[in-house]
């Protein structure tokens, strides 16, 4: 049996020049955000408790809790809204095609019976309001000529809907059924976000023209604005009201978040500018915010989520981050009695996690090059990108030292350290292998066939190279020369991964034809066969520290764990470990497997042996 013990969640997907809308449920103190095809539910006071919904067929753009906190409506780039249950089984209540293009915002009516959605559409249909149970339209929304970026439902009766967007307009509708009432053109650039105060007396719009305007909630007339004194110096992307309707939180491309006091008349003055952590780079632009209970939540373009205390904004904020893109590799090692997990995504981000605690920082590298292959031991990282270079980066605790880069002439396919003397490394490219000692190339061998995977033994005396033809070539290593000893044929597809067991007595290989094989290193006989339980290519493979178990991860989203001494049929299968496929695997101890994948999440699974 394998049970999910921890999830280190991905961060929200962001795009430059656009705000993102995060929402929450004050009752359970949880927030919702989207990444790829997933909707992530996170609890602000319990960061390792994460629930993920992955049933959309397209990228999800926005998600919101119903007023009673029991249902979630989420929308995607195809214009579809799905309504599903918050609890673990995420039962689907309804699915409606609402717009013909991407949905940018949606909101529930305060009674939970209607939903309004806005975004891109054909003709003039950029906004639609409908009944949550039947999908029937509840009004006509004329008046916009371009994409509608945000919409809001008045939280008190009489109901109103306000919309705003790329045509610089703010439109006000009365209903239900909703009809156009008036249009306001007070902004001179995209209007990015509109929100009603919780008491319904006012609403506010914020725009790329750096302004925030306040309106009467009942009539839609403009009554005030945010002061330009101490105001934002860049586009304002998002706004959120305090629960008592007296203050708002705004975030901007100028990398700052501000708390404003809103007077009865509707004018706003800055009460506090929040100092957001970060180095001041492009990544630190702020694109999303939420005021929930005592938490002020901000989201940066790089995906970092920062929590401030509303009652004590001077208190040091808590920040957590993670990956935004698919994680292609991970590595686990012990560092001063903590189990450290390093994961890398192809956009060049390497994140450090501590098992049991979660996020522990990003490894800042001088060269933020893209990463294709990655391996790590306690003192060193070795990475390769799409620039034909291999980089050896010293690790000093949580810091990266100066990288040494080695150009090996073509794109690295696979890389591995010699466990007992990590200065020795084997790199494979399409046409052959390269041996490195430290930053020096010891030898490069052209093998005359297409190489797809490679591994070097823990003691450095043997290497195995896997080919496109499904053959495993075993080499003995003497100094810097490789001598072919034998060719093993069992696989029926290109080899995708090879790994030696930690004790060096066995090795395991996996192929694109979904089969894995465990071999005895001395006799080169098959030790565990019929490992044919995946339904798609095997991407990654890992051994337990005591060499008794081997785990495989596949494009079919599953992780399968085998015991070497038992038949393959007594395996443990983790179904749906990662939406989109599993790309990284490692054991952190005899009873824990760490996995990562296309969904940009890292998960820790506890294994309990079946008697």
Image (cartoon, rainbow, N blue to C red):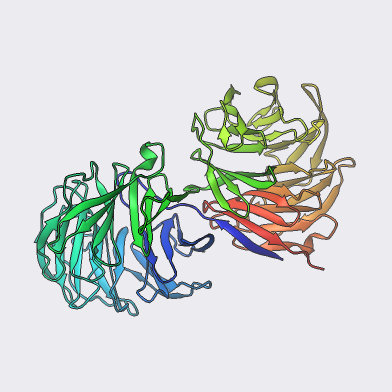
Q: Is residue 70 visible?
A: yes
The image quadrant that residue 155 belongs to is bottom left
Q: Against 566, is 463 above or below? A: above
Number of numbered discs visible in the structure rendering: 0
Residue sitting at x 49%, y 29%: 367
In the rendering, at what x and y percent does residue 608 appear? Answer: 74, 64
Which of the 4 image quarters holds residue 610? bottom right
Q: Residue at x 25, y 71 (%)?
A: 129
Foreground residue among 394 and 174? 394
Residue 609 at x, y = what percent? Answer: 78, 64
- Asked if residue 436 is positioned above or below residue 342 in the image, the reply reads above
Question: Where residue 599 sits: x, y (%)?
Answer: 52, 54
Q: Is residue 412 left or right of residue 156?
A: right
Image spot of residue 198 (x, y percent): 26, 69
Nearer to us in this view, 253 or 327: 253
Q: Quadrant of the C terminus?
A: bottom right
Residue beneath the point at 69% across and 31% down: 449
């Amino acid at each position: 049996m394998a049970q999910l013990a921890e999830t280190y969640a991905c961060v929200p997907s962001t795009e430059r020049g656009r705000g993102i809308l995060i929402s929450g449920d004050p009752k359970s103190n949880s927030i919702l955000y989207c990444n790829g095809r997933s909707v992530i539910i996170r609890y602000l006071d319990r960061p390792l408790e994460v629930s993920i919904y992955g049933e959309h067929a397209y990228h999800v753009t926005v998600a919101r809790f119903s007023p009673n906190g029991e249902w979630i409506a989420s929308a995607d780039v195809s214009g579809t809204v799905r309504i599903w249950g918050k609890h673990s089984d995420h039962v689907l209540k309804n699915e409606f095609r609402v717009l013909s293009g991407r949905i940018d915002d949606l909101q529930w009516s305060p009674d939970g019976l209607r939903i309004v959605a806005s975004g891109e559409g054909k003709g003039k249909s950029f906004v639609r309001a409908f009944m949550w149970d039947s999908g029937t339209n509840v009004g006509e929304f004329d008046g916009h000529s371009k994409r509608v970026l945000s919409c809001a439902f008045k939280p008190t009766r009489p109901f109103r809907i306000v919309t705003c967007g790329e045509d610089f307009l703010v439109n006000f509708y009365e209903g239900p059924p909703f009809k156009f009432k008036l249009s306001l053109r007070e902004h001179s650039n995209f209007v990015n976000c509109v929100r009603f105060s919780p008491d319904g007396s006012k609403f506010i719009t914020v725009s790329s023209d750096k302004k925030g305007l306040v309106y009467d909630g009942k009539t839609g007339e403009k009554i005030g604005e945010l002061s330009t004194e101490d105001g934002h110096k860049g586009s304002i992307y998002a706004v959120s009201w305090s629960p008592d309707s007296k203050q708002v939180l705004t975030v901007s491309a100028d990398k700052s978040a501000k708390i404003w006091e809103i007077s009865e008349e509707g004018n706003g003055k800055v009460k506090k500018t929040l100092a957001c952590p970060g180095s001041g780079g492009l990544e630190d632009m702020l694109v999303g915010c939420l005021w929930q209970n005592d938490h002020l939540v901000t989201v940066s373009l790089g995906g970092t989520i920062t929590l401030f205390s509303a009652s004590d904004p001077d208190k040091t904020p808590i920040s957590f981050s993670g990956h935004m893109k698919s994680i292609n590799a991970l590595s686990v090692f012990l560092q001063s009695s903590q189990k450290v997990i390093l994961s890398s995504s192809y956009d060049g981000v390497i994140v450090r996690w501590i098992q049991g605690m979660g996020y522990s920082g990003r490894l800042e590298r001088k060269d933020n090059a893209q990463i294709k292959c990655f391996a790590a031991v306690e003192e060193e990282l070795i990475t390769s990108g799409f620039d034909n270079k291999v980089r050896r980066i010293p690790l000093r605790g949580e810091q990266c030292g100066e990288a040494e880069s080695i150009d090996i002439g073509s794109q690295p396919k696979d890389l591995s350290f010699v466990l007992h003397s990590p200065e020795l490394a084997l790199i494979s490219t399409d046409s052959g292998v390269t041996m490195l000692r430290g930053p020096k190339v010891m030898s490069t061998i052209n093998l005359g066939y297409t190489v797809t995977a490679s591994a070097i033994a823990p003691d450095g005396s043997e290497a195995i190279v896997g080919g496109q033809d499904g053959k495993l070539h075993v080499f003995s290593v003497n100094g810097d020369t490789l001598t072919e000893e034998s060719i093993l044929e069992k696989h029926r597809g290109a080899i995708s991964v090879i790994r030696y067991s930690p004790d060096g007595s066995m090795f395991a290989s996996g192929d694109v034809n979904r089969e894995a094989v465990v071999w005895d290193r001395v006799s080169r006989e098959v030790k565990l066969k019929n490992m044919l339980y995946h339904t798609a290519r095997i991407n990654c493979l890992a051994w337990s520290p005591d060499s008794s178990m081997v785990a495989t991860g596949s494009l079919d989203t599953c992780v399968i764990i085998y015991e070497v001494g038992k038949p393959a049929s007594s395996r443990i299968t983790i179904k749906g470990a990662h939406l989109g496929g599993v790309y990284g695997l490692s054991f952190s101890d005899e009873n824990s497997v760490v996995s990562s994948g296309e969904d940009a999440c890292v998960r820790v699974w506890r294994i309990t042996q079946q008697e």
